[in-house]
Image (cartoon, rainbow, N blue to C red):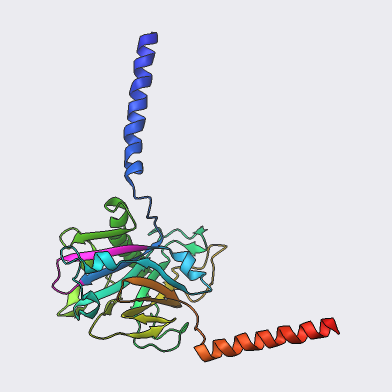
Amino acid sequence: MKSKSKIFILAATVAAAMSASPAQAQNANYDAGDLVLYFYQFGGTNTVALNLGTGFSFRDATSNSIAFKNLGTELSDGTTGFGASWFDSGTLYMGIAGVRSTSTSTGAQVNGDPNRTLYVSQNRTSVGTEGVASSVGYSILSNSDMTNGSGGFLAQNLRMESVAVTDRLVEGTATSSIDGQNPFLGSNPGTAFNIFPGGVVTKFGAGTFGTLGGVNAEAAVDLYRILATTAPVGTVDVGPIREGQFQGTFVIDSAGDVSYIVQAVPEPSSAVLLAGSALLGGLIRRRKSVA
C-alpha cells in the first residue's frame, strides 16, 4: 500500500509540474492591458513590437516621460528591422494598441478600467500644443465594435506573451499579427482591427515631425482611451462610452528613444523668468524674516 501511495504521489507531482510549465513559459515582461508600440512596413517582411507598460499608468500620467524606452537597435538592424535610415522611410508605420480583456461582463473593473477598455493611437497631424490632441479623435463606436476591436487587439498583442521573452519582439509577417490587424488598402492603411477605417497608425518620412516636450520627434501619435462601459464602480475618468478620450502623445526620435508627452514644456526664456521670480520671492521673504 505504501509503495502504491508513493507512486500515486509521484505521478501527481509530475502532472502538477507539467501543468505549471505553460504558465512558467509566459513572458514576465508582458501582462494583458499593457500597451504595445508596433512598427510595420508597406511591402515589408518584418514587424517590430515594444511593450510600453500598463495602460492605466499612461492614463494617470501627470508629467512627461522622456526617453523611457529605446528601440533603436531593433529598428535599425538591416536583417530584422528596417535599416539605418528607418526614421526617413516613407513606407514605415507606427501605432499603439492595448486592452486587458474581451469579456462583455460589466460587473467589475481593474485599475479603473472595465473590460474592453481600448487604448489606441491616432496619427498626430501637426506639432500643435503639447498636452493637447492634434488629431481628429474617435467618434462613437458600436458595442459590437468594442468587442471585435478588443479581440483584434489581444490577437495582436498576445504574441508578446506567447513568443517574446523580453519587452520587445521582432518577427516576420508570416507569423506576426501586426500586418494582419493593420492591413493596407492599396498603399495606404485600411481598416485596423476591423473597426477603425483609415487605420490607427502614423507614417514616417523624410525630415523630422517637429519638437514636442523638448524631443526632436521623427513621428508622433496621440493616445486615446475608449470605454465600452462606465457601469462598474471604481471606473476612472468616466466619460462618454465608445468615444475616444485623449490621454497624451507618444513620440520617437532618430535614436529610437520613445517619450510620452502630457504637458507643455516652458520655453527656455520662460523657465529662466520663472526661476528668477522664485529666487526674488525667496530673497524678499528672507529679508522680511530678518527684519
Nearer the observer, 231 or 78: 78
| In-front residue for pair 252/103 | 252
| 2 inside magenta stretch | no
Instruction: Determine the residue positioned at 54% across, 68% down.
Output: 236
How many marks the image carries: the answer is 0
State the image quarter where residue 45 is shown.
bottom left
Q: Is residue 184 left or right of residue 57?
A: left
Q: Quadrant of the C terminus?
A: bottom right
Q: Quadrant of residue 184?
A: bottom left
Q: Position of residue 10 (x, y in %)?
A: 35, 21
Residue depicted at 32% across the width and 63% down the height: 50
- Foreground residue, 281 or 108? 281
Secondary structure mostly seen in magenta is strand
Question: Is residue 272 in view?
Answer: yes
Please say if 206 is above or below 69.
below
- Quarter of the image with the N terminus in it: top left
- Horizontal and vertical percent position of residue 155: 28, 59
Which residue is located at x 46 percent, y 84 percent?
Answer: 132
Q: Residue 95 lies in what quarter of the image?
A: bottom left
Q: Which residues are magenta?
A: 41-51
